[in-house]
Image (tube, rainbow, N blue to C red):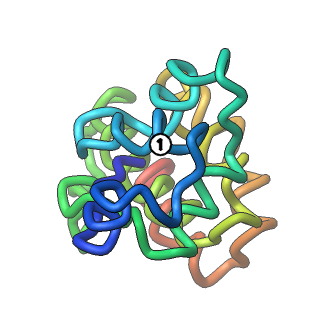
């Protein structure tokens, strides 16, 4: 998932309020180009955790980038390669797991770390369990139809 700074987040950064010194380092890196996993990896030595990122989301300092929102319709199913299925399913999976908040944060990181189609297929049961059959249906179609 890609995150960007909100107006209130930029103001908090400017005024040095609402963000801990530790969180500030990670906050600066959220530019809509780096994934949450990349920012966490870059700031791991400073002790930044998924909970820090979730706290900044909860405070309204960060928000999902419009670029990370998947299209409303999955790609046509017939004759798609595993790479095409992965690309369509990845976007849907990050949207679904990103919408779970802190409860789904680790699952969202797992989706971002999944390497290819097989990785997403392996995570599918966990995603289904977390969101239920109705919300999982779009992802199921993207992966298997």
* Image coordinates for residue 113, horizontal then vertical, percent: 57, 27
* Image coordinates for residue 130, horizontal then vertical, percent: 77, 68
* Location of the C terminus (image quadrant): bottom left
- Left or right placement of residue 114 versus residue 125 in this view: left
* Image coordinates for residue 23, horizontal then vertical, percent: 56, 44
Rendered view: 82 above or below 78: above
- Left or right placement of residue 58 versus residue 103 in this view: left
Rendered view: 47 above or below 141: above
Residue for point 40% across, 36% down: 35
Q: In the image shown, does 40 or 83 lie closer to the viewer?
A: 40
Q: Which residue is mark 1?
A: 24
Res 69 visible = no
* Image coordinates for residue 33, horizontal then vertical, percent: 23, 36
Residue for point 27% across, 49% down: 78
The quarter of the picture where residue 28 lies is: top left
Q: In the image shown, does 81 or 12 lie closer to the viewer?
A: 12
């Amino acid at each position: 998932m890609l995150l960007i700074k909100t107006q209130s987040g930029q103001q908090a950064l400017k005024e040095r309020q609402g963000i801990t010194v530790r969180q500030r380092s990670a906050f600066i890196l959220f530019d809509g180009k780096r994934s949450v996993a990349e920012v966490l990896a870059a700031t791991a030595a400073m002790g930044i955790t998924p909970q820090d990122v979730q706290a900044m989301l909860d405070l309204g300092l960060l928000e999902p980038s419009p670029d990370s929102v998947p299209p409303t319709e999955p790609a046509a199913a017939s004759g798609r390669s595993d790479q095409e299925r992965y690309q369509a399913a990845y976007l849907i999976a990050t949207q679904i797991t990103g919408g779970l908040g802190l409860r789904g944060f680790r699952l969202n990181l797992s989706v971002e770390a999944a390497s290819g189609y097989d990785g997403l297929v392996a995570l599918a049961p966990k995603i289904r369990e977390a969101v239920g059959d109705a919300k999982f249906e779009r992802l199921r179609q993207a992966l298997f139809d």
